[in-house]
Every structure is written in structure tokens, then in C-alpha cells.
Image: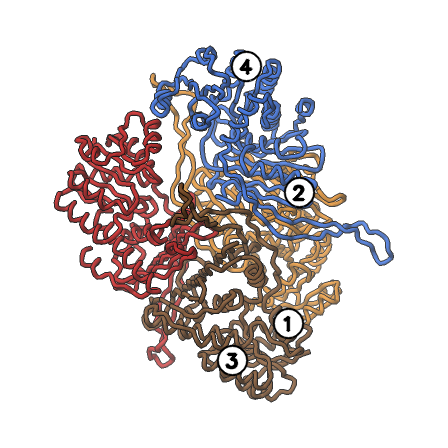
Chain colours: A red, B brown, C orange, D blue
């Protein structure tokens, strides 16, 4: 049984606490937050769990083997570094840090100390995204495009643009599902509230192959949409996360190319494009809560000294892309290269 | 009764012929096409209509007061110029010409000869788009964004990219519905078939205000989508052209901004964003076939020497944007300014 | 090539005329209707086709080998009998007659004269219903239920209830798809317009097995619904005719039953019900127009003296059920037995 | 602050406990259940709450002013009667009792002792159903029909048919929303598992007016549907409980009737039916959890000695209809009159 402390009991922290408290393989040692009201809430629901507003106390507690960090992004680096230096394994919310520089140092620190550093890219651990990855690997053919729309009304943030808030989900999914890593990024967006960050944005990711990825994120949409189209040369996927059960639909659709020959047997310039349309199917998905799967895996990695699927490297690649996108955003979509990412990945 | 000839009886021509033949205010004088098989099809269905493969014969026919051109884009300029020079009014398919230079000369020729030049921006004449325009004018507030997705599997074209084929619809709608004209355009796309034009593309239009427009077009999607989101400061619209009856939904949703004061009465930096969510409604739409409405209006304009809603200027603005988008597409989305358009519009 | 005449050019007649005129295997000899305006419409669209308002003339024309009847139901019997007695094959709209007695005499007359009598149960010839039949035969397991909702706003009829207008479609589909024939029927309905027939009705069909079928038809619904659920012990189907492409969805869902044993090894009374949930798939469907398929088959049957899938017997079974349902409707759903149908089928 | 005990911590009990514990106006005194495992679960989540497996202890506790009963239906009567006789107010799950006789005695007992008896008809307290009731009262016109489909895969029960499990929801909604009470009921159903109660059923309710209500319930459907159509002479409603936000849609649709006059000015027999189709709108709904609203109201009623909206009389009417439906079900839909209900209501 691994002793775990949770730092931060705001929006996401309660989910971590609930899942850790329900996993027989973990011992929820304590919860740390600066707000006494929140700590009182923990106390009343989990009377056996220690609460504190002093992070140093968490670090000193020998029962704490791992720390889950669910505080605002700006504090991830400082808290995670302290945790690692105190010899604790770290499970940190996404995005893993405010800059690629910070993320990179976290990765190095964890590696040096042979500690597990997992980033909470939750979607990667859903049945839907895991199935999508399986499908991409086994039969979509050449990858053509990945197109995601993630829009709704709400939850404007004041410190980061909609890219850091919403596109981060797509970047983490992309990083897991696609067979290659992006080489450049372009982002265009707009802020409709004076003095606030961009509330609508469009990201394009370029790859070495003909694959193109595009992400539309928006805090000001009248309807909620969570829909991704993935096109391959053999099959295509629609992933609609709002569907209650058939989240993934696989279409046996595409085009066929034939060289045309003219009457004299000479190959003519123009290709003939034919269309192929077969059955659609919606595979049954594992509906286990993603966070549960993810925490089990984090514990496995600690016990077996293995590498989490969404480790610090994955987290770093996502932050690098966010950083590049932010730079592009400031220049109306100028293409920003991601050479560094390739070097690391 | 206006005597009309139709040139081109391929994909769209039959719709023109059917609508003209059913309008009591027009006399369908003749149909011209290079294919004798197509002309035979016209003959068998419309035995009273003259058919010919000789465009000059159409020009010489004194009963022909107006010519509707539904041939491939590359021939629009030559045919329309000849028609105008022969004193005929012109109704031409979209895009009105292959280049802005051509379109511009068509506009000048029609103006010089005081002839009507209408461009078949069909969607502008649907009940849905007309209602959308009404809503934008009367109560959406400040315009924030226009986001369109127009994707499906099929009909790859060999001479033009998906932008000229599909985004042209959105550009014509935008031109009609939005209160301002774009000042710059950026386009990113990809061709997945060697030697063929781009089959997927993303266009962004920039305006002088904070309005941003984005268009996603794709010939290789597993599902058909025709969906536009329009965000304003007071209301938002979802326009789904595939809905059988409720194509336009108006949401009384948005955000409210409040300046926050701290405990000492000082205005603090951060704005508080509140969310507003009221009723949704789907206005009843006029379901008349757009082409019928459009042809009636073309006849009105001829009779009253009036200016069509989708006249040559509208057609020219759309072609200029297509041209700029094509240039941007070749440079991975470099922003191309549209100063010229503003001068004319 | 079979010479065919069409009698009745109202709502459905134009579809028959169009399909017959486009089939190279048929010769559309003439169209008969009492309205001179309608005959003029035929003339202008099909100038080569003879038109007449005299049915006797049709009967006398030796080129006419078969007659398609698309007149109001009340006239089907008289026209079809005359046609058969004149030695013509008959293709008649559904329901095939106003009473089972009439339908039965039509069947006998056709049999005696060895003429083909086909009933236009259009839906049976769609790709969707044919696929459904295939699925029922090959793998749904024991049939549990067939539940159809067929509602919309409109087209109130004055002579027959909504059952004869809308439920007739379901009865013809049922007759084709299900492995057994109904043995009894119950119908409940209501008329909301004084003096008019029932505009909403619910039919239940009973079978010898545990299969139950239910049909909801309504002329006064705010939305259009065409949705059938079919439950079998192995698989279940949702057939939504309004879906543009995925009309048939097959669910690998169901229950599993286990006998429970108590601690002492004795079988306890209660069964344990488990739930099974696998993939869903939507098979590709043949999208050929049903009427085209049907007319081709009618011609095949004439040429090869074969039996149409929707022959007079099928038409008679449907009319018997409609008759029984009408009787039940008048008695608030009293169950009416269908013994006669079983004897014939 | 009202002291409340909850009896039964199975499927629904935890929701009661959570809501009562979160209401500042109530004091959750204790939870009673026969299972020690369940009581342990209560203990760990609500350490301050007393737990017991002895109902008599609950009755003796002077702090307990009201008892919420969430045990199996068969025990409602015994527990509620004891509670009332001990002077406690009662909040009981639906259906309120296993027989109308029991329900009737509960109503009398509460009346005699001037205690509040509320039945947990949860749906009545949702924003959607409350809005529906408002709409029916204010502008739907004459009521034509109420048609509900409530189907899904799952949760077979062994002691009661699907009517007592699922149709009870519709009956409680109907009882609240419709302007009149049913006078007769017919029910048809089928059991597909030997020895088990009916898993599919169709209920029809008759009224003195032309209103007709129909309910389709099914435990064996491949998809989940929760959809009600309500037709009135002025407006129509679609209530889809699975829609995340627009659960209620109001259609300005219907028919218009005109008496037709023939050429000589005489009124002819046939009515002309016209169709009317206007805007649709989806009113904003109060999204408060129904159970919270309901418990607040229960407390209000206790404090002000008022009558709950879903009081014992409402519960009794629902049970009477269930009882009548069960009788009808055993006789293939024989119409069963509900005279008794009218006498009481």
C-alpha cells in the first residue's frame, strides 16, 4: 500500500481524494490546502485523513511516499520540485508546468532520483481514447488528419488563454494516439473581453508526413461540443465524448485512386478518385473512471519502477506545444517550429 | 416575361432549367451545352425548348434577354463577357470567375452597359440565411465570431482546391450576413492525394473589429456536417443546415462583465465574468427553394433596373478572398491582406 | 419489354410514372386519370405517352400487358378486377383493397387467370427493411418485440383512420420481416376532430409465441418520428428511417439468465438476470429507390411467372389486420382474433 | 430545524441521506438499515450520524420528527403506519404502497393525526416537469394526448412488473401535469423470462374528455429513451429528459379546421384541415436537483402544516392506477374503470 498525500482541494482535488480513498492499494495519508474551509470539508467527509495547510509538513511525513498535486499551474513547478527533492513520487495535474523550461527540469529531477513522475492527462486513460489508439495502430492506414472541436460556454480563466485550458486535452490525446509528433504549430485566436486572454482559438499542428491536426477551442459557444474526426487512408473515426455510450464510431469509408488510361493505353495525367463506403461500428468501451485507471497505474509504476504512459516526457511535449502555440497566437498564426520536442521525444 | 437561355446542363444546370421553366415570369428560350447527350435529355423533358451546342447562336437570338451560365468556372469569364457585350443580362454560377481580375472586368462591363449581373450565391437566398442576417442586424450585439464546418466524403475536384468548392459557400454567406468585410485571410490545408489540390483546409478571416471568422472544409470526412456557430455579445446562433426543420437556433446566452471591488472599495484588476443563460428558440423559416427566390429577384432587377443582393460586387469580393486564401494556403497560412476588397466594397 | 399503363396520377402516381419511364425493361404505354389538368401535366413531361380519362380504353389497348393502380383505396377492387378480367397483370397501391373480402376476391381472380398481382408495399423493398429481414433470419435469436413509432404533423385523411394511412406501412414490414404471423390484434385510438376518423392510434399484435408487436401512429405530432425497435434474445435493432445513412443499428445487447443455487446446493426460485453489452454496428445499406427495385421485380415475375415478394396474399394479410384493428378500435381495444389470416397464409 | 431519520440505505437511500445532510434546515438524526455493511458505509461517510438496524429505536428517538422511507415497496405500509402512529411525519418512496388499500389507510392515518405524508414523486419536482405543468395550464389549449416512451436495458425486478418500476414515473407526472384524472386504464405486456413479471408493457389511460395517454415501458431496449410528446390544440411539447439542457421544446404547431362551403353556399360534410407551423422554443429550466426541492418543500409543509404537492392522495391515485393496470395486464388489455379514484381525488 502506497501512502499518498493530495495537495490542492479545489476543482479537481476532490476527485483525486475520492479515487485514492477508494483504492485499496493506496493509503490516503493527508490533504493539504491553504483554505481552512476546504480542509474542514475534507475533515467532515474523511475523518480519518490528516489535513494541513503546511506543505512542509507533508514533505516531512514519512508515511507519504507520493504526492498528487492539484494546485494552480503556476505552483506546479515549485511544489513538484520540493516533493521530488524530498524523495516523493509525483502525480501532477496538466499542464504539468507553466513553461517548458520548468517541465524539463521536473523531468530531469525525477530521472536523477529515479522517482516516478506522472502527469494527469486524464483523457488518455479513458476507454474511448485507449480504443482510438488501438484503432490508429491497427487499421486506420496512413493518417490524414485529426480535427477536434472542444467548445462550450463557461469558465473563463484570467491567467491563461483557452489554449492552456482546453486545447491541452487535445494535445495530450494527440501525443498518445498519433504515430508521430508534431514539428510545428500555428495558432490564431481572439480575446473578446478587454484585458483578458484569448477565449477562442484555432491551433494547427504540422507533422513530417501529410498528417495535419487542428483544434478549435472556445469558451463562448452556445452549445457544448466535444467532437473529434480522425481520417486515415483505410478507416475514419468520429469520437464524440458527449455521447452516453457510443463515443467512438469507426467508418469503413474512404477514397480509392486509380490511374486512368486513355483510349490509346497511355496513362493520363488525372487520377480517378473513387469512393468507398462500408459498415460503421461502435466498439464497446471500457467505462471505468479514467482517474481510477490512472491512479492504479501510478501505483503499479511506483511498485515496479515502471514508466507511466503519461510520464513527464509526455507532459513536457504538451507544454512545449502550448508554449509554441502561445508564441504563434501573438503573431496571428506565424508557424512556430517544434524542433526541440523532436529531440527529446 | 423575360426570355432566358441556360448555358451548361451538367450538375447545376438542370436546377436552373427546372426553375426557369416553372416561373411564369420567364420564358425558357433555349439551353446550350457541348454534349449532344445532355441536349437530348433537355429535348425529351422540355420538348418546346430550343437546344444548341453553339453559344454564338444563343447570343444572336433576339428573344434571349438574359443568360444563365452554369459551366465550369474557367469558362465563366469568356461566356459572361460575350453575353454582356451582346447586351444580355447575366446570371452566373459561383465562384463568378477564376480570378479577381476577371471578376472585376465582368463587373465593369455590366456597369458600363447598365446590365444586370447576378451571381448565384444560392445559400444567401435560403430562408435560413436570410433569417440569420435579420438576427445579426437586430439583436446579436457585437459580433464575436463566425465558425463554420462544412465537411463530407466526396466529389474531389481536380482543378480547384476544396476552398473554391466548399468554402465559397461560407464566404458568400459571410459577405451577406456580417456587418463588416474581412481585411485579411489565412488558410492552411493539405492534399492527401499526390498531384491533386488540397482536400482539407482551414480558413481564418480577420476583421477590423474583434470579429473572427473560421471555416473548416474537407472532402474526406466520414460524416456530413454543415454547421455554423455565430457568437454575439447578446445572443448566439447555431445554424445546422442538415436539420430538417429547425435549422436556426437562437440562444440567449453569453457572459456579463463586472468590475470587482475589493474590501477597501478599490477597483481590482480582475474582471468577474458571469454567465447568462436564457431560452433558446428556433424561428420558423421560409422554406421556398432558394433558386426560385433568386431567379424571381433576378427578373425583378431586370424589370426595375435594380441591384441584385448577390451582385457582381459580392461575387468579386468572394473571388478576391478565395484568391487571397489560395495564396496563403501555399505559404502555410501566412496572413494575406485584403485591402483591395475594402476599396471596392 | 412489358407494356404498362398507370391509372391514377395524384400523390403517388407520378413516382410510378417516373420509375416506369426510366426502366428500359418497361414501355410506359399510357396514363389514365379523371382530371384533365393532371393529364396535361403528364403530357408536358412525357410527350410520348398516351393519356386518357377512359379506363375502358386502357383495358382495350393490346399493348398494355400490366396495369399499375394508384387511385384512392375505395376504387382498387373495381379497377383491379376489371384489369385482371381483361387479362392484365396488376400492380396495386397499398392497402390493396378497402375490405378483406375484396382483397380475397382479387387474389382468387389473379390465381384463376395465372396473372401476377403485386401489392406496392414499398418499404419492404428498401435496403433497410431487406437488411432487417436478413438480420432477423440470421441472428437475432428468439423474437421478443417489434415496436414502431410513426408520427408527424399532417395529411389528415377523411375517409380512413390513421391506421389505414400509416400503420399499413408497419403491417407490411412486419409481415415480411417477422418469422410468424399475428394471431390477434388490439387497437386503441382517438379522433380529435369532430366527425373525422381517429388521428392517433396504438395497435398491438399478438403472436403464438411470446413475440409482441406495437405500433404508434399519429397525424398530430409536433415532430416527425419513424423509429422501430426490434428485440431478440441475441441482438437488438434500432431502425430509424429518418437517419440519412445509418438507418439500421444492430446492438449486441441482451440479458443472460442463470439459475441461482443457494448455500445448500438447492436451486432457488429466483433467476439471476445478467446484462450483456457488446459492439454496435450499422451495416451498409443498398440505397436503390425501393419503387425501382419493386417494379423490376414485378417485371421479372411477369416474365418468369414467379411470385412477387409482396403478392396478393401479403396484401390480403395486411388488409385483414387493418380490418380487425378497425373493429378493435371501435371497442376500446377489445382483442380481435385473426384466425382467418392464419388459415390463408 | 427538523430532525429526520432515513430508513433504507439501498439504491435511493444514499440520495436522501446526502440531500438531507446538505440541507441546513434539517438535522439528519439517524439512518436505519438491516445490513451492517450499509450502515458501515453510512458511518464512514457521515461519522456524526447515528446508525441502527432497529426501526423501533428510530421510532423511540424523540429527536426524530420525520421519517423518510426508502425500503422495498412491500414494507412501505408497515413502516409508514408505525411511523405515523408514533407521531412522525412521513416521506415515502414511490410507489407509496403495494396496494391501494394500504395507500388509502396510510392517507387516513396521516389525516387523522394531522401529520404530513409526502410521496417521493421525484420527477414532479424537476424544473422540466414544473415548466411543463405551467405550459399546460397557460397555453396548450385543449389537451389531445400524452405519449411517453421510457425504455432501456436493465434492472429487471423480480417482484413487480416494469409498470410498477417505470410507468410509475409517468403516472406521477401525468397526475401533476394534466388537467383531469384518468377514468379507465388498459395495459398490455409480455414477460420474456419464464417465471418473471412483464418486462415490456403498454398502458393506455382514458379520460372523460378526448384526451388519451399512453405509456411504453421496457426493460429490454437496446437504447435508453425518455421522451414524452404532449399534444394540445394550441401548442405541442416534446419533453426529452436525456437532453442535457433543452429538455422541453414547445412547438407552435397544430391544425386549423374550416367548414367548407360548396358552390351553392351549402355547408358540406367534410371539414378542411389546415396546418399551422410557427416557432419552436426551449424555455430555460431550473436545474436544481429535484430531491433537494422536494425535501425543502416537505420541511415547509411540516413547519406550516401545509399540503405537499405530491401528498398521500397523489400517491394513492398512482397506486390505484398501477393496480388497475396490473389487472388489465392479466387480461390482455381489458379496460378497467377507475371510478374509485375519481371518488377520492
Q: Earlier in the sequence, mark 4 or mark 2?
A: 4
Residue identified by numbered label 4: D84
Residue C195 shown left or right of residue D77 in the figure: right
* Front of the two marks 4 and 3: 4
Q: Residue drawn 66% across and 47% down?
A: C164
* Front of the two marks 1 and 4: 4
> Tag 4's secondary structure?
helix
Residue identified by numbered label 2: D140
Circle number at residue B296: 1
Circle number at residue B35: 3
**Residue A58 versus residue A12: which sits nearer the camera?**
A58
Residue D204 image position (x, y, % from top left): 62, 34
**Residue C7 versus residue B87: which sits nearer the camera?**
B87
Image quarter (top left, top right, bottom left or bottom right) of the C terminus of chain D: top right
**Real-space Cα distance between discs 4 and 3?**
91 Å
Q: Are marks 1 and 2 on the same chain?
A: no
**Real-space Cα distance between discs 3 and 2?**
58 Å
Amino acid at each position: 500500500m502506497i501512502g499518498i498525500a493530495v495537495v490542492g482541494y479545489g476543482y479537481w482535488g476532490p476527485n483525486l481524494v475520492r479515487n485514492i480513498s477508494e483504492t485499496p492499494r493506496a493509503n490516503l495519508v493527508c490533504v493539504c490546502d491553504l483554505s481552512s474551509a476546504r480542509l474542514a470539508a475534507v475533515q467532515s467527509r474523511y475523518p480519518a485523513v490528516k489535513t494541513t495547510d503546511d506543505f512542509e509538513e507533508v514533505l516531512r511525513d514519512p508515511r507519504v511516499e507520493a504526492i498528487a498535486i492539484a494546485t494552480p499551474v503556476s505552483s506546479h513547478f515549485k511544489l513538484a520540485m520540493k516533493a521530488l527533492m524530498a524523495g516523493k513520487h509525483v502525480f501532477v495535474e496538466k499542464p504539468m508546468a507553466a513553461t517548458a523550461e520548468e517541465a524539463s527540469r521536473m523531468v530531469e529531477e525525477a530521472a536523477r532520483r529515479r522517482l516516478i513522475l506522472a502527469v494527469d492527462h486524464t483523457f488518455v486513460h479513458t476507454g474511448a481514447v485507449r480504443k482510438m489508439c488501438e484503432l490508429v495502430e491497427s487499421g486506420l492506414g496512413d493518417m490524414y488528419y485529426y480535427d477536434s472541436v472542444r467548445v462550450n460556454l463557461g469558465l473563463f480563466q484570467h491567467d491563461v488563454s483557452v489554449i492552456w485550458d482546453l486545447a491541452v486535452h487535445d494535445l495530450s490525446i494527440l501525443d498518445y494516439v498519433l504515430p508521430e509528433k508534431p514539428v510545428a504549430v500555428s495558432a490564431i485566436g481572439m480575446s473578446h473581453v478587454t484585458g483578458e486572454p484569448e477565449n477562442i482559438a484555432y491551433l494547427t499542428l504540422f507533422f513530417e508526413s501529410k498528417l495535419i491536426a487542428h483544434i478549435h477551442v472556445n469558451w463562448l459557444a452556445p452549445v457544448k461540443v466535444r467532437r473529434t474526426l480522425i481520417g486515415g487512408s483505410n478507416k475514419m473515426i468520429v469520437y464524440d465524448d458527449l455521447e452516453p455510450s457510443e463515443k467512438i464510431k469507426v467508418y469503413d469509408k474512404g477514397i480509392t485512386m486509380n490511374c486512368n488510361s486513355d483510349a490509346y493505353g497511355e496513362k493520363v495525367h488525372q487520377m480517378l478518385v473513387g469512393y468507398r463506403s462500408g459498415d460503421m461500428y461502435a466498439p464497446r468501451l471500457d467505462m471505468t473512471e479514467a482517474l481510477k485507471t490512472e491512479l492504479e497505474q501510478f501505483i503499479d509504476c511506483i511498485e515496479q519502477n515502471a514508466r507511466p504512459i503519461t510520464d513527464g516526457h509526455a507532459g513536457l511535449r504538451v507544454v512545449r506545444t502550448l508554449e509554441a502555440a502561445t508564441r504563434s497566437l501573438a503573431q496571428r498564426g506565424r508557424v512556430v517550429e517544434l524542433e526541440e520536442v523532436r529531440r527529446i521525444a
